[in-house]
């Protein structure tokens, strides 16, 4: 998708559709004012007569607009001026691109950079526009004999008014374009059925990404024989009941000026289908357990974004992948397994399997001597009870890392909420027969899952993102969301900026 930037008079722009945001109150924004003048006060009259209600997210298409070179004019409501914060801005942008995606239009020009958003500059607004464009045109038609029509939109021109920062808009749209690609890559992996998207499929996907990267990405795949030799018995225990072999996937990107600079790491839970194992899940909604690899999918998406943007940072991405199924070889409740770190775990519930694959991956991460490690997992239903479907749960053994992730989430508007990881919760994981149990009971289930992982992260700054409530939608809009790719990519971009500042100070 292309995102050129123009500063020309919007009335002279030749495009299939010109998108103009409008507040319910006050004067028209700069681009809208010029268009209103050129069209014999068309916009002003529509508002004055009540033919267009500028409530937030309301869209009205005007097929013919006199005095303009655009084929169509689209008005988008911003609501009240004083309530136009980040969330309102994104809602208006999403509404516009949702409408654009249904039009027989190859290109559009949008004037969202005119919208004043407190504490957000031109680059942020351009980035949000580019991300929204990618989200809007996404369709998952891979398995339909009569696929739904695919949006034609391929080019979105960002209009910057006089005095605006064109270079910042270009950079913002470049980053938004890369993040949008990563979001949609994550959605596709999440939406694929479990009989297609297996641990082996993910491994092949990583190898293909490396082959397509022109040397920017390298990949190493550890199969079950290698994992057995390594001692990753916890990861292997989860896939023991499946015919699909487990995999540990390692992807490396070196973008920092110093190739020896400590890498930042992303670790994703890749349970490609979670039946619960012997602790079998109820049948209702079990089809959605193909989404249990969305942590891994978000890691693939973040790598996709990094390859598109090419930040100056070193990254190691690990995906621990298995299929959790019941059969005669499957791990049973009461079994005791030995982890790669050497700790023994009593498996009280085989449906608490994500932490069992992640703990070995987190131990494996030690060999890279990382600057930070962030794991991403659809880990607990308790996260949905605590936070609903809006915020990702965040726990960390390092307050600075936690704050960095929270800040990245605010910038990306892909927000997380910091939850406690106090020592008092660790007692819930006590076992009579092993070093620890894999569950700590119903109280504070999200936190005790984080406590379990923390036992394997004492060698580096670590944070855990529980995305059980944010990784996919249910119901009529069922499908992967692509979160938290935007948060993860922003975090890595911030680390690249930090590195560059430090180099300059030296």
Image (cartoon, rainbow, N blue to C red):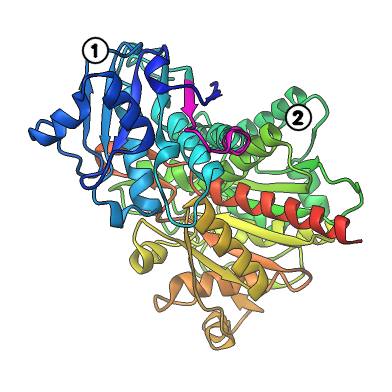
Q: Is residue 124 magenta?
A: no
User: SS class of the residue under badge 1?
Assistant: loop
Question: According to the image, label 1 marks what residue?
Answer: 66
User: SS class of the residue under badge 2?
Assistant: helix
* Nearest to viewer (mark 1 / mark 2): 1
Vertical position of residue 346 compared to residue 112: above or below: below
Vertical position of residue 367 compared to residue 214: above or below: below
Counting labels gives 2
Left or right, residue 240 beside residue 135:
right
Instruction: Indicate the position of residue 20 as horizontal and vertical percent values.
Output: 32, 30
In this picture, which residue range is highlighted in magenta?
156-172
Vertical position of residue 292 compared to residue 150: above or below: below
Image point (45%, 62%), residue name: 380
Label 2 neighbour load within 10 Å: few <14, some 14-19, many 20+: many
- In the rendered image, the quadrant that contains the C terminus is bottom right
Q: Are marks 1 and 2 in contact (CB under 8 Å)?
A: no
Q: Quadrant of residue 444?
A: bottom left
Question: According to the image, label 2 marks what residue?
Answer: 210
* Nearer to the camera, 367 or 338: 367
Instruction: Indicate the position of residue 159 as horizontal and vertical percent values.
Output: 47, 28
């Amino acid at each position: 998708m292309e995102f050129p930037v123009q500063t020309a008079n919007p009335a002279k722009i030749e495009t299939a559709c010109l998108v103009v945001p409008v507040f319910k109150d006050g004067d028209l924004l700069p681009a809208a004012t010029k268009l209103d003048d050129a069209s014999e006060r068309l916009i002003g009259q529509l508002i004055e007569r009540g033919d267009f209600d500028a409530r937030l997210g309301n869209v009205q298409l005007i097929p013919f607009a006199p005095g303009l070179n655009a084929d169509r004019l689209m008005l988008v409501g911003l609501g009240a001026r004083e309530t136009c914060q980040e969330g309102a801005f994104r809602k208006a942008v999403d509404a516009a691109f949702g409408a654009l995606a249904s039009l027989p239009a190859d290109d559009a020009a949008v004037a969202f950079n005119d919208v004043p958003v407190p504490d957000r500059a031109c680059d942020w607004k351009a980035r949000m526009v580019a991300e929204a464009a990618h989200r809007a045109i996404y369709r998952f038609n891979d398995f339909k004999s009569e696929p739904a029509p695919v949006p034609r939109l391929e080019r979105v021109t960002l209009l910057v008014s006089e005095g605006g920062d064109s270079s910042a808009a270009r950079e913002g749209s470049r980053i938004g374009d890369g993040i949008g690609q990563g979001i949609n890559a994550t959605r596709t992996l999440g939406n694929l059925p479990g009989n297609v998207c297996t641990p082996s499929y993910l491994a092949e996907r990583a190898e293909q990404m490396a082959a397509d990267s022109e040397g920017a990405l390298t990949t190493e795949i550890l199969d079950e024989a290698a994992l057995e030799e390594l001692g990753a018995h916890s990861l292997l225990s989860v896939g023991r009941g499946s015919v699909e072999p487990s995999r540990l996937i390692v992807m490396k990107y070196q973008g920092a000026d110093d190739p020896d600079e400590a890498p930042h790491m992303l670790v994703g839970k890749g349970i490609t289908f979670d039946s619960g194992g012997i602790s079998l899940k109820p049948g209702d909604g079990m089809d959605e357990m193909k989404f249990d690899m969305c942590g891994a999918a978000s890691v693939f998406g973040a790598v996709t974004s990094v390859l598109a943007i090419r930040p100056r940072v070193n990254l190691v991405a690990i995906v621990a992948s298995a299929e959790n199924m019941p059969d005669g070889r499957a791990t049973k409740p009461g079994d005791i397994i030995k982890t790669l770190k050497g700790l023994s775990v009593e498996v009280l519930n085989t449906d608490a399997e994500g932490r069992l694959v992640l703990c070995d991956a987190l131990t494996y991460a030690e060999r890279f001597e990382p600057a930070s490690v962030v794991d991403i997992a659809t880990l607990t239903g308790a996260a949905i009870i605590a936070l609903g479907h809006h915020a990702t749960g965040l726990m960390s053994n390092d307050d600075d890392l936690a704050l960095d992730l929270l800040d990245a989430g605010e910038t990306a508007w892909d927000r997380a909420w910091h939850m406690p990881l106090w020592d008092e919760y660790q007692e819930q994981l006590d076992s009579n027969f092993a070093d620890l149990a894999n569950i700590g009971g119903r109280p504070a289930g999200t936190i005790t899952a984080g406590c379990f992982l923390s036992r394997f992260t004492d060698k580096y700054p670590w944070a855990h993102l529980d995305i059980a409530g944010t990784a996919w939608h249910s119901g009529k809009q069922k499908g992967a969301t692509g979160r938290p790719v935007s948060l993860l990519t922003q975090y890595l971009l911030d680390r690249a900026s930090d590195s560059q500042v430090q180099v300059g100070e030296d």
